Amino acid sequence: MSIMEHAYYASFGYQVTSFYAISSRFGTPEDLKELIDTAHGLGIRVLLDVVHSHASKNVNDGLNQFDGTDYCYFHSGGKGNHDQWDSRLFNYGNYETLRFLLSNLKFYLQEYKFDGFRFDGVTSMLICRLHDVS
């Protein structure tokens, strides 16, 4: 289950609206840091479930149309929509998109001391990238 902030509760956290915020549904950032420190003290490694394959299509509380366009971080038009997930698809061919997503990973490693990541929707990420190349 993803712990990043999300508006749509039924998505179980997989329609992220704020990539740098821990959902308050799970406690405070300090609570999460304490949980990870405790796990590390017990010799347990902690992975973050990351949703970098897509994001919430919400306009008011997410990245969608962040700069007034539909292509700041996502593919434009229909290519940028994942109809089955009702969300937006990142454009990995865009330097700013890659910089944003990689900075997001670095943030969680440095700030919370996660040991690694589990990436959700990798198949969707690969298919998007293959379409970019062809």
Image (cartoon, helix red, strand yellow):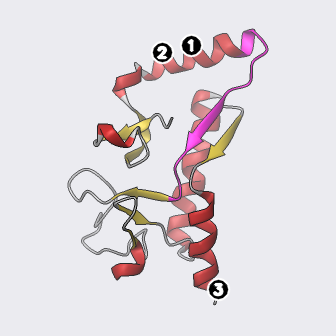
Q: Amino acid at mark 1?
A: Glu
Does residue 41 sit above or below 14 in this rendering?
A: above
* Tag 2–tag 3 contact (CB < 8 Å): no
Q: Quick one: SS at disc 1?
A: helix
* 74 lies left or right of 108: left
* Tag 1–tag 2 contact (CB < 8 Å): yes
Q: Quadrant of the C terminus?
A: bottom right
The mark that comes first in sequence, 3 or 1, is: 1
Residue under circle 3?
A: 133
Does residue 124 sit above or below 23 in this rendering?
A: below
CA separation in Å, label 2 and label 3: 42 Å
User: At which x and y percent is residue 25?
Assistant: 35, 24
Q: Nearer the viewer, mark 3 or mark 1?
A: 3
* Highlighted range, magenta: 40-53
The mark that comes first in sequence, 2 or 3, is: 2
Residue under circle 1?
A: 34
Q: Amino acid at mark 2?
A: Asp
Q: How many discs appear?
A: 3
CA separation in Å, label 3 and label 1: 43 Å
* 134 lies left or right of 91: right
Q: Amino acid at mark 3?
A: Val
Mark 2 Cα-neighbour bin, 10 Å: few <14, some 14–19, many ≥20? few
Q: Residue at x 62, y 19 (%)?
A: 36
Does residue 127 sit above or below 28 in this rendering?
A: below
Residue under circle 2?
A: 31
| Image quadrant in which you'd find residue 79 | bottom left
* Tag 3–tag 1 contact (CB < 8 Å): no
